[in-house]
Image (cartoon, coloured by chain):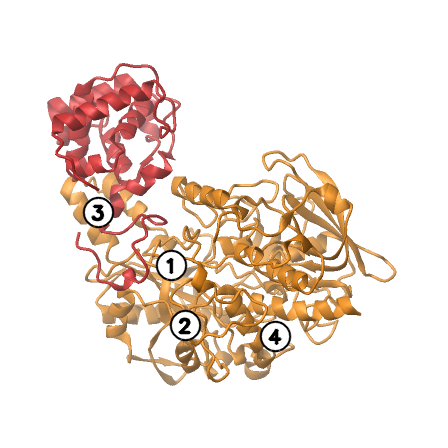
Chain colours: A orange, B red
Amino acid sequence: MNADPTPVTLVTPETVAGTTYDVVVVGAGVAGSIVAKQLSEAGKTVLIIEAGTGEGLTSEGFYGYVESFYRAVVKNPNSPYPSNSNAPSPTDDSNGYFHEQGPLPIGGSYTRIAGGTTMHWEGKALRMLPEDFELSTRYGIGLDWPIGYQDLEPYYRKAESELGVAGDTEEQKALGVPFPNGYVFPMKKIPPSFLDEVIRRKIDGTTVQLDGHTIELKLSAFPQARNGEANPDFVPEKGTSGKRAEYTVQCGGNASCVPICPFQAKYDARRTLASIASPRRVHLLIQAVASVVEIDPASRRVKAIQYKYYPDKNSPKHMIGIAKSRLFVLACNAVENAKLMLASNLPNSSRLMGRNLMDHPFLLTWALVPEAAGVMRGPLVTSGIGIFRKGEFRSKQAAFAMDINNGGWGWSGTGATNVLRDAVDNKKKYGQELRKELISRISRQLLLAFMCELPADSGNSVSIDPRYTDQLGNYRPVIKFDIPDYSKLTIAYARGLSRKIFSILGAEDHTFYNKSDPAYFEYGGEGYWFRAGNHFSGTHIMGKTKTDSVVDAQLRSWDHENLYLVGGGSMPAIGSANITLSIAALSFRASDQMLEDLRG
Amino acid sequence: MAKLNLTRRDIIRGVSITVGLTNAGACDDIVRTAPEVAVDPVLVEYFLNFSEQATGFSLDDLESTDQATVYFATVRDALGVDRLGEFLHAYHNDGLDAVLGSPRTGPIARNVIKLWYTAMWERLPREWQSAYGRTSNDTTFIVSAAAYKTGLLWRAIGVNPPGANAPGYGTWSNPPART
């Protein structure tokens, strides 16, 4: 990216007050940025309201984030980004933003800042499988999408072009992902790590049993939105950022993808904002937290979005403003979208606003391999196992995908710094003994992470309660969450699979789930804890009728004809695919419909 | 990093002078301002000897981090001049094992090791603070962004510090560095 790459127009509340826009978008993350870009390039005027700050809109500001990361004592997913009590971001339960009612905590993190959670995401760019759209019809579980894979396929291509995906379509086809003939990703797959290859040599071809079927283990590269080597056969989709790989920096192996890519080789939504061709048509108001969706009671059309604008993130002093337009788009993620709608006292005729909250729970397992295999190098994940994403077993237990984590045990709580502390403080090591200990206990670390599907359940929800607010007086999300046996069965299966893999590798299994962990549960006589996938979804699902869903197949609200709710919240099922690519695809698709609406 | 033909004496003298300059506020890298105090090059020598022995890295390695000055000042500011002097004299007179084994100096010694390895000063344990006192600088912090990048932990295990000194596209496919 060049210096100061932000061709959107930063505005003040005064400007907003004096302007009527074609579209108001709430949230400058991947969904909001794609919508803003699509609509502005078709000649529409757009206002983006962003709750957080926008330091990262300049190169200097972005490098400020990198420096903050270096200086952070706890390197959590939001550690590069300024703490902001006016628009708090949940950070793995460390700041009490969510009020978790249980029985299990959803936990996790997202980032309320210009660029959104794509600032800190890992970068996997997976399509859902065709079966994932028909979970209920095929397997009698959860909910169906009102559209099928083929309806979304052209938009997946647009999303892959926009995000700059590096992957191997042949490998993905073998895993059940259909592509048009001859289609390739913008970039070739990211080279597998040395660690991946050590594992591959030992486990590829091993068979395991699942639901009476014999399955052969096979590693594959995960498609990811990370700059690699341009694919010469790639044809950019019209209206997307296209051949970014030619102009931007390749991944250099910073190994800090979560929470920040200092090379900006990992896609984040600022890239979409920076590529907007008509910057004067897109206004961006940062430090403005949308607080009420105002409707006309007779027509139920949205009239305006009320927001709280704070000049200084270190002070709760704020002013109320309103933003008017013909069309409104909520794009601030599944939790914040639902929270905003609930806070606005709207009809909610389906009674489903906030309900069907989903995430992908991760089971983590960790071991020491016999020999150092180059851990803590490269992107956090390059390869894994994708063959359990599909199968008849899904009528009984959840699909899942397995990551080989190149970053060692950090996610499970015993990263390099923890090992050092333990070695020095508890084991009293020093000098050469200390160095040997570190090599033995860090360089041999292997973490396998299993991402499990979770079907929609209306009992899992985001709601609001006047007892729980932030310092601006906005609601904090109240969460009810549980994991069904359908997913727990897979979590237990994954634990068994990890044991088998560790055994084949000759690795020392160090996995241990402490009972005192808030995410601890027991199943089948064994204890586990899970970690959040940060794939918040399902809180305003799409569907075929206004009684069984919140938005229609175009993501337009059934209740309010000029309101769209984009993002993971609209997804009625999430398969075993990280949701960002699907969010991007849906944003492109919804933008087409928005333009139709604006024409009429 | 180019190796100059510096003697131990040169290095120690260099650090002492720079810490002295630091007292005058010349060095922007210091997170906390240093009090006005004369710097005893003998203490600096003891500090570097201790650091070399305790970390398992040579004086040249320590010097190549460019953080010796800053770390000395950090430890001095966190402990106060008296406690620092006590610690370093105890090391010089009684040796590493004694200093690591004593409740008075052990936590300090371990903190200095961790400081070199992670660029982080960790607040001393509550029991130590109750017994021996605390200064306002004794909190947990990373000394600076620049220091973070030089942490010996990463060198010890043969990788770049996460988020910095990226080794290049595809290098993660190569066998690991020999450590």
Q: What residue do we see at 69% from left, 60% from top? A: A329
Residue A143, which numbered label? 4
Q: What x and y, as percent, mark residue B63?
A: 21, 34
Question: Which badge, 2 or 4, is on the more N-terminal residue?
Answer: 4
Query: Mark 3: which amino acid?
Result: Ala
Mark 2 vs 3: CB contact within 8 A: no
Using the image, determine if residue A52 lies above or below residue A561: above
- Mark 3–mark 4 Cα distance, whole angstroms, equals 51 Å
Q: CA distance from mark 2 to mark 3?
A: 37 Å
Instruction: Say if labels 1 and 2 share a chain.
Output: yes
> Which amino acid does the dot numbered 1 rest on?
Cys
What residue is disc 1 on?
A251
Tell if the residue under mark 2 belongs to the same chain as the one under mark 4. Answer: yes
Question: Toward the viewer: A248 or B84?
Answer: A248
According to the picture, the residue beneath numbered tag 2 turns out to be: A231
Q: Label 4 crowding class (10 Å Cα cut-off): few <14, some 14-19, many 20+? A: many
Residue at 62% across, 55% down = A332
| Pointer 2 local density, CA inside 10 Å: few below 14, some 14–19, many at least 20 | some
Between label 1 and label 2, give the one nearer the viewer.
2
> What residue sits right under mark 3 in the picture?
B156
Question: For the residues carrying marks 3 and 4, which lies nearer the camera in this image?
Answer: 3
Rendering coords of residue A585 (x, y %):
58, 69
Which image quadrant for residue A331? Answer: bottom right
Q: Is residue A578 above or below residue B105?
A: below
Badge 4 marks a residue whose secondary structure is loop
